[in-house]
Each structure stands twice: as structure tokens, then as C-alpha cells.
Image: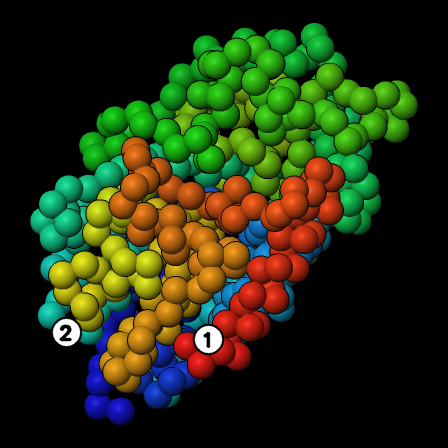
């Protein structure tokens, strides 16, 4: 085919869009500014880098995240194929060795005959067939260009959690278990605290000194889904105990009782030599992170191989600007994909890239673009980000609340979620088999 598509951004959304188009015979020029230039949060030179957590959320189909991933598999997701090859134990979640995950994606993209990777910064939105998948960390120059196109830009903040070495964790003061005994016994290392230890930790945390933000990160408008632990703690003494440090579903074998509070550590790589502090995204100064987090008994001698960092995330006012097929209103051969559209989460971003790639191909083929049924997770998120009636638009991740309710109502939550997931997969299959597809 003579048509060429330019994709800006080599993150999860960008590689998914490129994969879809290339496999349909289109020539793709994938622009990725690394390693020529890095954002404040990126470290790897490869494509598909995971910046925050290494978890892709729940695996089981009867969860919102699980349903999303199953839908992605139907469309031949490159991210799901690579994730399945480098999975690390994480209870009921799909977590990956982030270095291997990124390496595998890069290897497959580089090997595709229809994809050319161009390592340079794109400062202006080019003409022609374009998919902007620059992620929530678009460069200043590109962000300015997008803002001019869109008339305005929106920003929120994201934070990454620290990583410690396994050998530095005091296992005499920790225990392995998955919450509610879901998954393997050693999927998580649990760091329990009694009431006295927790309260001392809480006081140190809320008085610790935060790191200076970059010049473009001065407005402290934190996104609720990835809030720094110190900001969460500032909302009240027990907020952490009802959040990332909740002790429910866990029993300390040393005491036979549920701890007062628990920090969970999850494997960061396939060898299990590094663990990340689950839910402990932070913007504290590095020295303060070492001091405060080492107050957790099991981490008293912890070796931090990466400290938590904060960075800017950017998203556009999609309900005003995008159609449900991720195309830009007013320029039919311009699509957006990824977190910049207001979908929140790794797999949500990747799924939007799948749809942007499919729909760009269909548009160039003269076919009707696709918006999946609202009973599917991808379809529901597509409708959410393009719904002009949404007030105070904020990023949205996969959740069963965006799907139409099951009627008659199923009271049992587990049964209801199972029914929603089964309905979603059935409706997706029927849609793909229909004449409309």
C-alpha cells in the first residue's frame, strides 16, 4: 500500500497502533525521541517502557482489568503477547519484568518490515496521516503544539514507587502471602507494623521534606489513582490503613493475628532480586525516602535501587476534541492514543492504541471506523473519553462502573462481575462476526 502513517511516541499506545497498521500492510514511521532525548521519568532506551508500576493489574476475567486484557488479546495485542512471555509472580495480578517486557516489544517492532523507527523529537504535529501517542510525558515543544491545536491543555501529576533489593529485606520481620490467599504464597512480601510503629511512621511521613518539582510541575494537582503516599497520609492518620497499607485479608504467622498495618512488596523482575513498594508512589527527597521508609521494621536495612520520583502527566479535553474512534474532530486523518486521551493505565493506553491503529487503517481503506459495543471495556472507555456530556473530565481506567448495568440486578458482587465479563466477551465476539465489523 502507498499510504504511510506517522506515529508519534513509542510507548504502549504507539507500539500497539504501529503493530496493527503494519500487520495490515501499511507503512509506518514510528517516532520515538529516546535515546536522543529523555523525559524526566524515562530511563530505558527501548520502546514500551513501564515508568510507574510493573503491574498490569488483575488477570482474572471477572475483573475489569482482566476483561480489558482479554479483549486486547482478541485483536492480537503486541503488549499482551510480550507480557505473557515475561510475567513475574504477583498474586492475582499480571506483573512483568519491565526490562524484558520493553526489550521484547522493541525486538518485535524493529523486526517488522513495515515499520521504520525514527529516533528524534517531534516538535510540531506533521501533516498527513498521523497518530499522536506521545503519552502523558510529551516534550514541552510537542505539548505546546498539541495545546495550540486543541485550544488548551490539562495536566495532572503521577508518581513512581521506590524499589529495594530482596537481600536487604529483613525477612524475620516480614512474611510472604497474597491477600485473601489469592495467587502464590510468595507472590508478595508483607511488611507488618503494630499500632505504635505505624503511628511513628505516619508522623515521620507527614513531616518529611518533599523534592522540588521541575519548572513545569509546580501546580500540585494530583491524580487520585496514583497519589503520592505522603499526600494520602496528610488526609488523616488512618487513610493509609484503608488504602495501600490495609491489613485485611492478611494474617501475620508470627502472631496469628491481622497486623495493624501492612506494606506489600511485589517482585520487580523475573529473578525476584528486586521488589517495589506497592502503593508507595512518592515525591519525597531521596534522603527522606531512605529515612522514613526504613522505619518500617522489615525495611530497616533496605537497599534502595531506585527512589520514587514525580513527573507531569498531560491529557487533552477529549470529550470536546475526540470521536469515540479516537479521531480528532475537524481533521479526519489525525488520531490520538494513550493516556493523553484521558484513558488511565498501562493497558488502557495500549488498548486505545489498538483502536487508533485499527481505525486509521479502516479510514484509509474507506471503511467505517469502529467503536466497540458499550458492553465491552474498550467500547465503554472509548465512549467515556468522547462523551461531551462528561463534566470536569478526568482520566478513567478500566472499571465495571463504566459498563451498562446487568438487569435484573445481581446482588452478589462476584457473580455480577462474572456476568459483566462474560457479557462483554460475548458481545465482542458477536460484533466481530457481524457485517458491521
Q: Which-is-in-front pick, marks 1 and 2?
A: 2
Q: Quadrant of residue 368?
A: bottom left
Q: Is residue 120 above or below residue 67?
A: below
Q: Of residues 51 and 212, which is closer to you in this image?
A: 51
Left or right of residue 332, residue 261 in this image? right
Drawn side of residue 239 relative to residue 436, left or right = right
Pick the front one: 309 or 394: 394
* Mark earlier in primary sequence (1, 2): 1
Label number found at residue 128: 2
Q: Position of residue 121 (x, y in %)?
A: 20, 61
Quadrant of the frame with the N terminus = bottom left
Residue 333: horizontal and vertical position, in percent?
A: 19, 70
Residue 150 in view, yes or no? yes
Q: Tell me the SS state at disc 1.
A: helix
Q: In the image, what residue occupies the spot 60% across and 29% down?
A: 244
Q: Residue at image x 11%, y 70%?
A: 127
Residue 250, how many percent across, how many down? Answer: 79, 30
Q: Residues within 10 Å of mark 1 (few under 14, many from 20)?
A: few
- Image check: 3 left or right of 23? left
**Disc 2, SS:** loop
Q: CA distance from mark 1 to mark 2?
A: 27 Å
Which residue position is annotated with label 1? 107
- Residue 96, how many percent across, how many down? 59, 57
Farthest-out residue, bottom: 1
Which residue is nearer to you in this view: 43 or 216?
Answer: 216
Amino acid at each position: 500500500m502507498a499510504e504511510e502513517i506517522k506515529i508519534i511516541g513509542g510507548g504502549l499506545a504507539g507500539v500497539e497502533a504501529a503493530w496493527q497498521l503494519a500487520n495490515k500492510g501499511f507503512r509506518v514511521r514510528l517516532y520515538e525521541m529516546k535515546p536522543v532525548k529523555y523525559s524526566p521519568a524515562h530511563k530505558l532506551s527501548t520502546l514500551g517502557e513501564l515508568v510507574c508500576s510493573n503491574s498490569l493489574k488483575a488477570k482474572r476475567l471477572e475483573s475489569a482489568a482482566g476483561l480489558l486484557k482479554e479483549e486486547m488479546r482478541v485483536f492480537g495485542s503486541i503488549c499482551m503477547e510480550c507480557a505473557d512471555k515475561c510475567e513475574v509472580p504477583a498474586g492475582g495480578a499480571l506483573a512483568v519484568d519491565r526490562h524484558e517486557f520493553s526489550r521484547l516489544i522493541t525486538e518485535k517492532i524493529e523486526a517488522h518490515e513495515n515499520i521504520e523507527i525514527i529516533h528524534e523529537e517531534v516538535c510540531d504535529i506533521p501533516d498527513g496521516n498521523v497518530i499522536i501517542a506521545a503519552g502523558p510525558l510529551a516534550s514541552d515543544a510537542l505539548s505546546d503544539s498539541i495545546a495550540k491545536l486543541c485550544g488548551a491543555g490539562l495536566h495532572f501529576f503521577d508518581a513512581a514507587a521506590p524499589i529495594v533489593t530482596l537481600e536487604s529485606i529483613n525477612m524475620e520481620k516480614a512474611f510472604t502471602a497474597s491477600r485473601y490467599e489469592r495467587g502464590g504464597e510468595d507472590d508478595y512480601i508483607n511488611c507488618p507494623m503494630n499500632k505504635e510503629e505505624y503511628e511513628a511512621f505516619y508522623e515521620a511521613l507527614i513531616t518529611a521534606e518533599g523534592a522540588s518539582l521541575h519548572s513545569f510541575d509546580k501546580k500540585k494537582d494530583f491524580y487520585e489513582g496514583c497519589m503520592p503516599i505522603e499526600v494520602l497520609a496528610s488526609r488523616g492518620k488512618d487513610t493509609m490503613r484503608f488504602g495501600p497499607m490495609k491489613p485485611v485479608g492478611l494474617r501475620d504467622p508470627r502472631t496469628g493475628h491481622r497486623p495493624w498495618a501492612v506494606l506489600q512488596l511485589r517482585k520487580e523482575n523475573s529473578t525476584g532480586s528486586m521488589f517495589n513498594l506497592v502503593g508507595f508512589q512518592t515525591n519525597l527527597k531521596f534522603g527522606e525516602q531512605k529515612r522514613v521508609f526504613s522505619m518500617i521494621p522489615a525495611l530497616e536495612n533496605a537497599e534502595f535501587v531506585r527512589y520514587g520520583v514525580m513527573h507531569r502527566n498531560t491529557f487533552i479535553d477529549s470529550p470536546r476534541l475526540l470521536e469515540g474512534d479516537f479521531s480528532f474532530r475537524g481533521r479526519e486523518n489525525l488520531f490520538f492514543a494513550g493516556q493523553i486521551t484521558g484513558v488511565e493505565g498501562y493497558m488502557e493506553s495500549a488498548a486505545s492504541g489498538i483502536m487508533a491503529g485499527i481505525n486509521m487503517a479502516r479510514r484509509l481503506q474507506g471503511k467505517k471506523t469502529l467503536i466497540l459495543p458499550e458492553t465491552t471495556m474498550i467500547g465503554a472507555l472509548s465512549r467515556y473519553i468522547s462523551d461531551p456530556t462528561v463534566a470536569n473530565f478526568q482520566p478513567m481506567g478500566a472499571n465495571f462502573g463504566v459498563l451498562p448495568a446487568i438487569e435484573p440486578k445481581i446482588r452478589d458482587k462476584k457473580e455480577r462481575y462474572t456476568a459483566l465479563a462474560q457479557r462483554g466477551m460475548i458481545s465482542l465476539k458477536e460484533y466481530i462476526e457481524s457485517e458491521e465489523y
